[in-house]
Amino acid sequence: MKTQSFFLTIDQQTVKVDPKNYFKSDLGHEGSLLRAALSHDLKLDHRCGGAGRCTTCHVYVLKGEEALSKIQIKEENQLKQVYGRQKNSRLACQCFIETQKEIILERP
């Protein structure tokens, strides 16, 4: 990840994501939305510890989808089980930040 900071918002709580603090959390995969959120004290459920086995980190991406990785098969299969799935649904533990742009998320 580059050294440029960006803003991450979850349910109207916004933090400036500083790449120096990005990996404070050891939950979720390196570079994931889950890890970025937890490293900056944003609350996201994660019963499976970020392993992609539950769906409790389900979020809606309201802005910044282009900054995120494409949905992979594992995430797609898990999302099929999500009640309330929408076109902009993602699992924060399986979704990776690829460019530093503002990202706005909402929990279901």
Image (tube, rainbow, N blue to C red):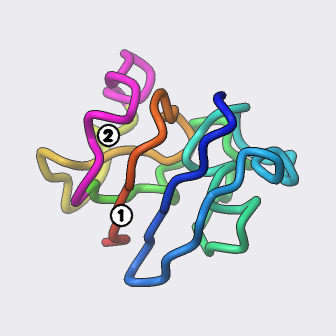
Q: Is residue 65 magenta?
A: yes
Q: Quadrant of residue 1?
A: top right
Mark 1 residue element: strand
Q: Quadrant of residue 16?
A: bottom right
Q: Is residue 1 magenta?
A: no
Looking at numbered disc 1 in the image, what kind of residue is underneath it? Leu
Residue at 52% x, 53% y is: 6
Q: Which mark is residue 79?
A: 2
* x, y percent for residue 103: 38, 55
Q: In the current view of this chain or complex, which residue is farthest to the top?
A: 73
Looking at numbered disc 2 in the image, what kind of residue is underneath it? Leu
Residue at 84% x, 53% y is: 25
Residue stretch rendered in magenta on the structure = 62-77
Q: Which residue is mark 1?
A: 105
* x, y percent for residue 95: 47, 35
Mark 2 residue element: helix
* Drawn side of residue 32 relative to residue 103, left or right: right
Q: Which mark is residue 77?
A: none
Relative to the observer, which residue lies in front, 1 or 42?
Answer: 1
Neighbours of disc 2 within 10 Å: few (<14), some (14-19), many (20+): many
* x, y percent for residue 68: 38, 33
* x, y percent for residue 2: 64, 29
Q: Earlier in the sequence, mark 1 or mark 2?
A: 2
Q: In the current view of this chain or complex, which residue is farthest to the left?
A: 87
Residue at 70% x, 33% y is: 29
Neighbours of disc 1 within 10 Å: few (<14), some (14-19), many (20+): many
Q: CA distance from mark 1 to mark 2?
A: 16 Å
* Drawn side of residue 74 relative to residue 90, left or right: right
* Drawn side of residue 60 relative to residue 74, left or right: left
